[in-house]
Image (spheres, rainbow, N blue to C red):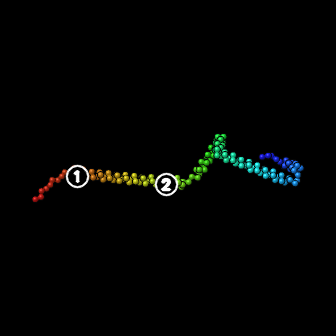
């Protein structure tokens, strides 16, 4: 705020002692202290209100963007650090790991069901071939003439 040293404070105190008098000097200092406290409180409140208004207006994001544009190397390093931190926090036993395990189990069930259907189809085709072969042999065999029984 103001750059006041001890010598200025001593000079002001001596002048105040002469002008105001020793009897009213403590009252004066008390009033000056209260005034300074109120002034600091008002300044603090004003500063807080300005910061809140800037946050609502998005000034913080704009300033972050400007800092990133001014120093792209640091921004790149920050991004790499963030990515590395995120990568070290990765736990394969989390939801992603569970989901991958469920997908693997489902794929295994699908493969087993497909293999069973394929083997059933092959067995059915072989049975059909055997029946067709038997029918062809039966058709190719000459019929024996019926014998008369006397």
* Image quadrant in which you'd find residue 93: bottom right
Looking at the image, the residue that sits furthest to the right is: 18
- SS state under label 1: helix
Left or right, 139 with respect to 50, comes to: left
Label 2 neighbour load within 10 Å: few <14, some 14-19, many 20+ = few
The residue tagged 1 is 138
| Callout 2–callout 1 Cβ contact below 8 Å | no
Q: Visible in this render: residue 64?
A: no
Q: Is residue 64 above or below residue 97?
A: above
3 and 52: which is toward the camera: 52
44 and 78: which is toward the camera: 44
Left or right, 43 with respect to 126, comes to: right
Residue at left offset 76%, top offset 50%? 38
From the top left corner, tell me how far across and down residue 87 is, in percent. 58, 50
Residue at left offset 51%, top offset 55%? 98
Q: Visible in this render: residue 99?
A: yes
Specify the quadrant that holds the C terminus.
Answer: bottom left
Q: Which disc is residue 101 wearing? A: 2
């Amino acid at each position: 705020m103001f750059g006041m040293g001890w010598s200025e404070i001593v000079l002001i105190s001596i002048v105040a002692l002469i002008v105001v008098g020793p009897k009213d000097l403590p009252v004066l200092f008390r009033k000056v202290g209260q005034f300074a406290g109120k002034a600091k409180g008002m300044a603090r409140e004003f500063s807080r209100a300005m910061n809140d208004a800037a946050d609502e207006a998005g000034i913080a994001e704009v300033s972050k963007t400007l800092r990133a544009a001014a120093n792209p190397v640091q921004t790149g390093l920050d991004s790499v650090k963030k990515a590395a931190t995120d990568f070290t926090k990765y736990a394969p036993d989390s939801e992603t790991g569970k989901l991958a395990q469920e997908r693997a189990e489902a794929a295994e069930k699908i493969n087993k069901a497909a293999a069973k259907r394929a083997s059933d189809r092959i067995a059915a085709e072989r049975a059909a071939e055997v029946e067709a072969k038997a029918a062809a042999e039966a058709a190719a065999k000459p019929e024996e003439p019926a014998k008369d029984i006397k």
